[in-house]
Image (cartoon, rainbow, N blue to C red):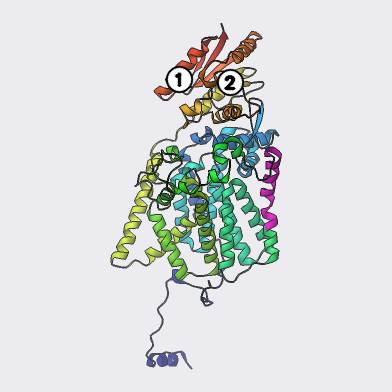
Amino acid sequence: MSRSTRAKAHSRSGKTPLKARHPSDSVSSEPVRPGGNGAEASVFRFEGIDAALLALLLGFALLLIAGTGFANGQELWPMPDAVEYAAVAVNLDRGLGPVLHFAGNSYPSRYTIGYPLMLAAAYPLLGHRPERLCLVTALTALIAIAGLYILTLWVFDRPSAILAGLLLATSPHFLGLSTCVMSDVPALAVAVLAALAFLYAEEKESLVASALCGLLAGLTVTIRVTNGAILAGMLAAVLLVRPRRLQFARVMAFAIGFTAFPGLQALVNLHYLGSPLSSGYAFWWREAYSSVFTTFELRFLFVPWDLTYRHGNLVSYSIAMLGLDGLLNQLNLGLELQTLLHSRYCLYPFPVPLFAGLGVFFAIRRKRNARTMRAMYLGFGFLASLLLIYLPYFFLDPRFLLPASFIVFAAAGYGLVSANRRLKRGWAGFAVIALDVILAGAILVDTVSRLAEPPRESRLVAEVLAMRPRLKNAVVVSDISLQWLELYAAGERTELVGLNNLASELHPKQVVSEFHLYWLYEKKAAGWSGPIPPMLLPNGELDLVEAGKLAEEDKQGRPVYLLVVMPLTDEWWDELKREFAEIDRRFSHETVADYREVGLYRLKPH
């Protein structure tokens, strides 16, 4: 039968031809089975235009990261988290092991070794300069953006990949944390790479990709233990998406790869903490980590552990995930004090989760192939499991959800593209345009305000490094964190002595806060008999024994210095005056260096 004859017959039958589908409506050539998820998608290709677009995207992200500034990262803020990551990395490089080391003593770290291993590997390339360790985090931020672009391109399409990358690159929390020595952004980067390896392993049935996926999943778990929630997403993707490919050989390859980093962590815990399952948190902060029932409680869903927070975890995390934290005055959480100085939202503005919801809807309705559904189950399964872990957790901070947020940005990119391709007259079209305008305006305002001011430079680090040659073969008494000073100020034969154990109460939000000394003296009061650094003014009063030792050091020709941070509040000034008055009972002091951030004084016994 000729083509014209078939057309006439079709017309006589009373049937109308099918309308051409929009390109974004394409589905697999194989039918979708009830309860199934269709066949595999078309072959993925990363073309030259993708390389060019990704280069532009990474250049824009680098501009935003540089515009945010690296002062926080150079100062190892926030305390004590960043200083611990840096200290473990530096001590690994020095051959001391994955420990904290200050005032001649070594202590276990609170954190797992995944991120410090990354820092330690890069430390020699950075010239053994701890103030440059933040560049490692910035590099992982670019890897996260690149990985998200490739993931979204593979699962959805190119326009969605561009938008997903832009949304992540302009996320205030992502940008702020990209300049800090913190594990959130590296955890996100490794999670995205693990997701890519998982999807490839499932689609190609590759043993090598399965082992690599396991290795990356194990690494992200040792970057942050709660990232083990990604296993729930992977399991959901394997069991709920057809065709199911749970093959024994690939499961074993994944398991072998996965056990590498957690196995190393177990050995570290056994050596330094006495048990493979022990945690450094319990060593330092037993009050909150003595048992799982004190760390996780259902009451934290509704009542915040720290009463300075306005809401419990359920409301706070809901607000953050919906992008309403700025509108509802909920930005006073943890790291937002510095990373979100000018922002009006934490992770993204509120149109993003709405577009992500549309992306999920369109993906299920129009693009139901196995690859897409695996990505959706993996990502949202990871996010939901992570949220379930942190909802009853006593400490509250939206940055904990960042490692699993990649699926929100990917789905939002696809939702943006799909919704705008289907614009029609009426309230639905108007709503989409309104969301577009709000989203673009929010990102534009946040980006302009971020770049309008020059990035802050760290005077503190520069001033302390300038003093360092003078501190060789000297005794330094200071209210600055001894671990921080060990990294930046301690030269050859420099001995560090704490000033007091009240610093963390007086200025808990400052980089100089001495949490570790404070915790060690709390442990001593509770009966702990381990080594503790000396202190000149325990509980604010002069220790005559320690003062006598310092006087003897001076008599033998070894200089004794007092290094203090210039106070930022009247209460802090008053406390410093009381401390100087107490020291004056036994020593006189002369100014050696008077900088804007710190002051150095030579102590001489009367």
Residue designated by label 2 = 535
Judge whether residue 252 can be spotted in this image.
Answer: yes
Residue at 42% over, 49% down:
320
- Of residue 11 and residue 528, the one placed in the foreground of this image is 528
Above or below for 366 versus 436? below
Give the prevailing secondary structure in the magenta stretch: helix
Circle 1: residue type: Glu
Above or below for 441 versus 120? below
Circle 2: residue type: Met
Q: Is residue 2 left or right of residue 254?
A: left
Residue at 62% over, 29% down:
527
In percent of width and height, residue 256 lies at 70, 56
Q: Earlier in the sequence, mark 1 or mark 2?
A: 2
Q: Which residues are magenta?
A: 255-273
Q: Is residue 263 magenta?
A: yes
In percent of width and height, residue 550 lies at 61, 13
Residue designated by label 1 = 575
Callout 2 secondary element: loop
